[in-house]
């Protein structure tokens, strides 16, 4: 089972990552101005993560594939790591779909 981990950035802004059951980070958020906003971002991932149409598949300038998860309004909720292949990226997307909805939240900011 996956989990969301909330941490603080160097500037003090909260952010979250979604980790798969094996502990690997599969999605990372932006920095938020408040913990409340960060928690709302997690809820958005739980809601949108299972939906195929919310994933935007992209290729970085260096040719590595990655994806964004977007909310219904088109705003990016989280970004994946860079993958070595499109197949690996698709596995990452499937992992988000599988893990997001039921993932626990671990707050490491307190």
Image: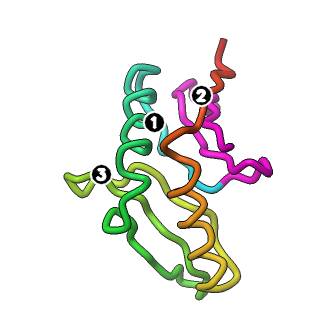
Q: Quarter holding the C terminus?
A: top right
Under circle 1, the secondary element is helix
Image point (39%, 66%), residue name: 55
Q: Which residue is mark 1?
A: 42
- Whole-percent x, y for residue 87 in the image: 62, 84
- Neighbour class for label 3 at 10 Å: few (<14), some, many (≥20)? many
Of callouts 3 and 2, the N-terminal one: 3
- Whole-percent x, y for residue 70 in the image: 34, 57
Q: Which mark is residue 71?
A: 3
Find residue 26 and report its image quarter.
bottom right
User: What range is drawn magenta here?
Assistant: 1-25
Under circle 2, the secondary element is strand
> Is residue 8 in sight in this rendering?
no
Is 93 above or below relative to 13? below
Q: Which residue is mark 2?
A: 105
- Whole-percent x, y for residue 5 in the image: 64, 33
Is 68 above or below relative to 29? below
Find residue 39 and report its image quarter.
top left
Of callouts 2 and 1, the N-terminal one: 1
Q: Which is nearer the eye, 15 or 87? A: 87
Is 24 above or below relative to 38? below
Image point (66%, 75%), residue name: 83
Structural distance between the alpha carbons of marks 1 and 3: 11 Å
Position of residue 32 in the picture relative to residue 100 (left or right): left
Is 87 above or below relative to 75? below
């Amino acid at each position: 089972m996956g989990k969301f981990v909330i941490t603080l950035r160097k500037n003090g802004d909260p952010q979250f990552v979604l980790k798969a059951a094996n502990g690997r980070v599969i999605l990372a958020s932006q920095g938020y101005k408040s913990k409340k906003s960060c928690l709302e971002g997690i809820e958005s991932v739980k809601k949108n993560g299972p939906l195929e149409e919310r994933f935007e598949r992209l290729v970085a300038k260096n040719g590595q594939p990655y994806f964004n998860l977007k909310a219904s309004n088109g705003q990016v909720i989280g970004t994946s790591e860079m993958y070595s292949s499109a197949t690996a990226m698709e596995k990452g997307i499937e992992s988000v779909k599988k893990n997001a909805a039921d993932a626990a939240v671990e707050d490491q900011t307190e």
